[in-house]
Image (tube, rainbow, N blue to C red):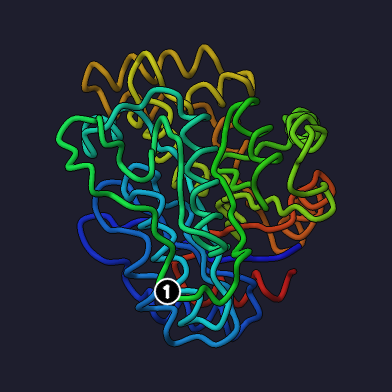
Amino acid sequence: MKLALQLGYWGAGPIAGAAELVTAAEANGLDAVFTAESWGSDTYTPLAWWGSATSRIRLGTAVSQLSARPPTSLAMAALTLDHLSGGRHIIGLGVSGPQVVEGWYGEPFAKPLARTREYVEIVRAVLAREAPVRSDGPHYPLPYPAHAPGSTGLGKPLKPITHPLRADIPIWLGAEGPRNVAQTAEIADGWLAIFYSLALADQYEQWLADGFARPGARRTREEFEVAATVQVVITDDIDAAVDRYRPSTALYVGGMGAEQKNFHAELYTRMGYGDAVEEIGRLFRAGRKEEAIAAVPDEMVRETLIAGTADEVRAQISLWEAAGVDMLMVTARDVATIETLAGLV
């Protein structure tokens, strides 16, 4: 089992002590450090800033939102960071959700699977640097069509001035539903699982197998990396650990999507918590946040939480590894936790 530090995205301000956490992750043998973005801090700036103090650990985005950058812009950032880090970058991509895509980026959310496939194809074409990049679209046409609104007709296919250090920078995709996970297995090098549940492990492996079986699939299961974000708490007080993460579970299920479309809510429904998901969402939409948090059952929090004594945590990590997880992306926020986890794994 590999360990990674998931710094995530910022709240009202930068993550306290992030530089020390990244230094500790490198010193204690963690495999990677990741940053995220929502509608505040971005992925690449903090990853480059804090990653500049490292020499070994891989530097990944988990995730960069597709709608935040055109695919050519993402490829530029990726090839730049890969050069600066000596070939240690992991491109992590995700579609986000309709509220963010349409509300923050002002773009349509429709056809997320098709958009992801086209986006990844363009990024790979830029990094390959074999020819000027062209794309027939329809989501990211290159060059911009001469007949399209506002076009001058002067656009021309280009390839990057800078030669990428690696043409095959790994691309990992954030995915939650069966079709999305299957496509991830088909076109990507790894899967970023935000809410991994041991109860659904067999289902996940079937979704992945469906993708690997497709003609032209990029990887086999043995070559593919599954990275799961998980809260790991070493404690004698399980109840306190559950209470600590109950608000974030409620937020993602009830407050991080629309009533008509919330991928996190759909995933927890697949886990068997449909009634609780419905109640949490209803309370959140009514502005009754504290009641929504209280409505989250303990077992729902435990579904994606590793908690217990050091020996219990070690045993639970072994179960996740046996289920097919290659990397645990832990949201540690103190050096002691990083050191302890590194000692366990």
Instruction: Give above or below for 140 relative to 286.
Output: below
* Residue 236 x/y as whole percent: 62, 56
Which residue is depicted at the point 55% across and 83% down? 86
Q: Residues within 10 Å of mark 1 (few under 14, many from 20)?
A: some
Instruction: Describe residue 283's horizontal placement relative to residue 129 as left or right.
Output: left
Quarter of the image where one finds residue 184:
top right
Instruction: Describe residue 207's horizontal placement relative to residue 337 as left or right.
Output: right
Q: How many marks?
A: 1
Quarter of the image where one finds residue 326:
bottom right
- The answer to whether residue 25 shows anywhere in this view is yes
Of 322 and 78, the residue lying toward us: 78
Which residue is depicted at the point 60% across and 31% down? 180
* Residue 321 x/y as whole percent: 79, 52
Quadrant position of the C terminus in the picture: bottom right
Instruction: Give above or below for 143 relative to 275.
Output: below
Looking at the rendered structure, the kind of residue marked 1 is Thr
Of 339 and 211, the residue lying toward us: 211
Quadrant position of the N terminus in the picture: bottom right
Which residue is depicted at the point 45% across and 66% down? 78
The residue pinned by badge 1 equals: 80
* Residue 133 x/y as whole percent: 46, 53
* Residue 297 x/y as whole percent: 52, 26
